[in-house]
Image: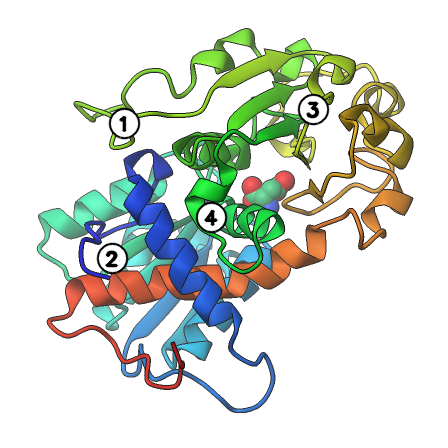
Amino acid sequence: MSGWQHRHILDLSTFSTDDYAAVLQLADRFRQLPVTGARRLPALQGRLVASLFFEPSTRTRSSFELAAKRLSADVMSFSPSSSSLSKGESVLDTARTYVAMGADVLVLRHRSTGVPQQLAEDLDRLGERAVVLNGGDGLHSHPSQALLDLLTLARHFNPKQPTPDVLQGKRIVIVGDIIHSRVARSNLWALTACGADVVLCGPRSLLPTEFADFVAAPPPGQARDPVPERGSVTVHHQLEQALPGADAVMTLRLQKERMRQQLLTSLERYHRDYGLSHQRLQLCGKPVPVLHPGPVNRGVEMTGDLLDDPHVSQVEEQVRNGVPTRMALLYLMAAAESVAEPSLVSISS
Ligand code: ASP
């Protein structure tokens, strides 16, 4: 795993193709571990992972906590409603309390863009050893979700060797509320880095045409893009234009909590225009997998029938892939700060 340069994991715009390859390779190995029984890897023994979710989460939080436990780390959880936040303590001060208690990794989710970045900068400035893993910030970034999506897609295209290059030239359609989606933004970096051609589709109010340039310039604060050549990004406002030729489709939840104004006339209308169904998927011209990061609104982003169809819906597979992907991230972060790589003794290579 030498070559891993990231102290904190905040945003995939800084990831190189080798970084994606390292995560996929390790996540796929972790995926082969039995999910039941007492078998844990000793890799993070003696480390403390604090899971600080200032915004609701079902999947990401439990998945990170399980991943940390599978690597034998101690886990501390934080709940905003019963914390000193209600007494006026700032988010950053709350997070630093966990560092003072010895947390090595802070998995942080917050409704405001940039909070994980600010915490990482504070820790670096103070010379603290603890590292930050972004569990989703505002509408900016959700790295672990895009990486588990990548594993899901790569395994779909090549179950035996799910490497980044199996995405090369694949047409991946992302449908829905793109403007409010940190999942879409992180997937744009990840998928184009692997050479996929991404097609974005949604109503104009949720998908400005400027998204076609999202990965065109070097990422903010970076002199150059760590990925020399990326796949393309295209914007369409009608599914009839987006779906033909698709190799996979990802649909996203309408992020009502982030909408400042009425951006849709009705959910029925949205479902009629952008909802996925078995019938609509015929436009792809071949059977394709459908991904959704969850939580899903049945009958809005897709029909209940489609969601429950294991031949098409990858939603449960995404959840399954979340744990090994997050184990890989925790492992790589721990490996980057140790002299010796953490032990992987119980995995046969
Ligand atoms: N769970 C994802 C997120 O936290 C997607 C969503 O909430 O719609 O961004």
Query: In the rendering, which numbered label is found on residue 228?
Result: 1
Residue 16 quadrant: top left
Q: Which residue type does callout 1 highlight? A: Pro
- State which quarter of the image contains the C terminus: bottom left
Q: What separation in Å lies between label 2 and label 3 (alpha carbons)?
A: 42 Å
Q: Secondary structure at mark 2?
A: strand
Q: Which residue is mark 3?
A: 245
Where residue 324 appears, as percent x and y from the top left, is: 49, 65
Q: What separation in Å lies between label 1 and label 2 (alpha carbons)?
A: 28 Å
Nearer-the-camera pick, 316 or 311: 311
**Picture quarter with ligand 1:** top right
Q: Is residue 69 above or below residue 6?
A: below
Where residue 245 appears, as percent x and y from the top left, is: 69, 24
| Mark positioned earlier in the residue sequence (1 or 4) | 4
Q: Are marks 2 and 4 in contact (CB under 8 Å)?
A: no
- State which quarter of the image contains the N terminus: bottom left
Q: Residues within 10 Å of mark 1 (few under 14, many from 20)?
A: few
